[in-house]
Amino acid sequence: MEAQAPTDRDIETAVEGQDAREHESAESERADSDGLRGSLSAIEAQSASQSDIPRRIHIIGTGSVGKLVAHSLRGIANPPPITLMLHRYELLQAWEKSKKQITIQDGEHKVSRGGFDVELLPEVRRQHGVELQAGKPDVYGVAGERMRPHEAAKLLGPGEKAAPQHQPVEETQEQFAPSGEGEEAQAQQPIPLRKAYYNPGAGQGDHAYSTEPIHNLIVTTKAAYTVPALLRIRHRISRSTTICFLQNGMGVIDDVNKHLFSREEDRPSYVQGIITHGVNVPPEVAKRDPFFAVHAGHGTIALGVIPREHPVREEIEDDAGKREIWAPSARYLLRTLTRTPVLCAVGFTPTELLQQQLEKVAVNSVLNPLTSLLDARNGALLYNFALTRTLRLLLAETSLVIRSLPELQSIPNINTRFSTQRLESLVTSVADKTRDNISSMLADVRAGRKTEIEYINGYIVKRGEEVGVSCVVNYTIMQTVVGKAMVTQRDVRDDVPMERP
């Protein structure tokens, strides 16, 4: 018999049947996954594997730590796609002219890895608290001679439309003049704008810009540059994004929330990390190969998800009731970092992570500023009674502040863990192990860069004010370091640039 061709109705029925079977299969897999995760502990569920999560990880900050993290992630089995976010066009040029690899030296061995994607961060200017996107008038150009800059900034707030790119601005701004003599007479007079041209690079690096959403972001910049860096990609960050901070100091997330994500319901999820790896870039190599770093000391990374009032979560019903599961992107980022052997990353509860952060801040609040002021290596603090007196004065304040923090009051053994004597032993131990190292703050001061002192000693001073402890010694040390950095910055600006033959 001759086979009959299937009718349209037969095809529709077959397709519907196939769709139904696929739906049942997906529901079965989801139920199995939920049942499996429901049987896991809180720590295991936080790191459990997931599906339908964007795997790409963006890294902002291509310093020594950023290069180590990116290089390590590309070395694991089934590595995630990695995008390096470059903050300068010169770095993009250097990358495109190079072998497009990151090289890490560990001892005598050098390992180069490629496969990275790169993006160029867009330039965002900020004047008098107003973000000036490409093509937007300059605050001082709008102000002219008849308006103060901060008043002109109000005219260029979020409600104003940006001028077309590469176009001159020579129109009249229909706004009232500032109050003063003859206010009523001036009230109806328009304010003329000076002619100004805005050229955001004439197309340089346009091919490396991106507007794609960012789901997983690792930030390794200096704490002081975090807000300006995130400001340039804020439009790509949503509530479903997870940002992992691998930086020194504390209080960065407070600044990010204050300046970038003031509405709690719009904030991304945060993962805080404490990194103890020793990584540096030799100055003689930095200019020749900006994508090279030396892994001088192996350490660990402590990770923890920062709690939020309204978590991005899903809830699973089990015998013990509903259990909260963190944002999918947060669990994916944790799972990826903890399965990277070189990084030795470990997940902790938020309370334990906070205590580890406070221990590191206490150690850094002594080593970093004192070595910066002395212009000496870490070992210089050892076996010097005069410096030991200063060290103990600093730690006495820090110990009292930490032991008074309200978030630690329900934790046992806090008074012993953060006693002045134990903190001093930690500082001495770290100074001895790193006796030949130059602290990152000293390197910043020598180079005329902004330091992280306000997120280390400044954090202790800030928390001290909250709990009623006057941190005179920490405040004095902080201001002295800031002053020395300013002196160095002036010297650097006055230098005549020289090129060696």
Image: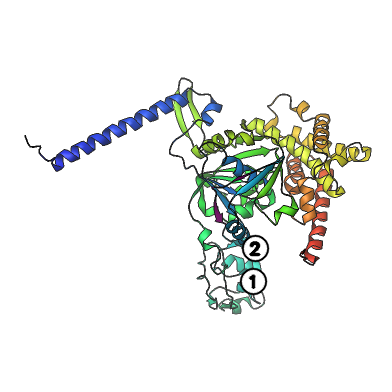
Q: Which residue is at a point 70% across and 33% down the rendered structure image? A: 356
Q: Quadrant of the C terminus?
A: bottom right
Q: Using the image, determine if residue 205 lies above or below residue 326.
A: below
Magenta residues, start to end: 110-120
Q: Nearer the viewer, residue 168 or 16?
A: 16
Q: For residue 342, what is the image quadrant?
A: top right
Residue placed under numbered mark 1 in the picture: 140
Color style of the picture:
rainbow
Q: Which residue is at a point 70% across and 35% down the rendered structure image? A: 299
Residue 112 colored magenta? yes
Mark 2: which amino acid? His
Residue 11 colored magenta? no
Residue reaching furthest to the left: 1
Q: How many marks?
A: 2
Closer to the chain start, of discs 1 and 2, is 2
Residue placed under numbered mark 2 in the picture: 128
Image x and y of residue 482, in percent: 79, 53
Image x and y of residue 366, in percent: 81, 41
Q: Using the image, determine if residue 113 lies above or below residue 35.
A: below
Q: For residue 18, what is the image quadrant?
A: top left
Mark 1, Cα crowd under 10 Å, few <14 / some 14-19 / many 20+, is some
The residue tagged with tag 2: helix, strand or loop?
loop
Secondary structure mainly formed by the magenta segment: strand
Mark 1: which amino acid? Tyr
The residue tagged with tag 1: helix, strand or loop?
helix
Image x and y of residue 272, in percent: 63, 39
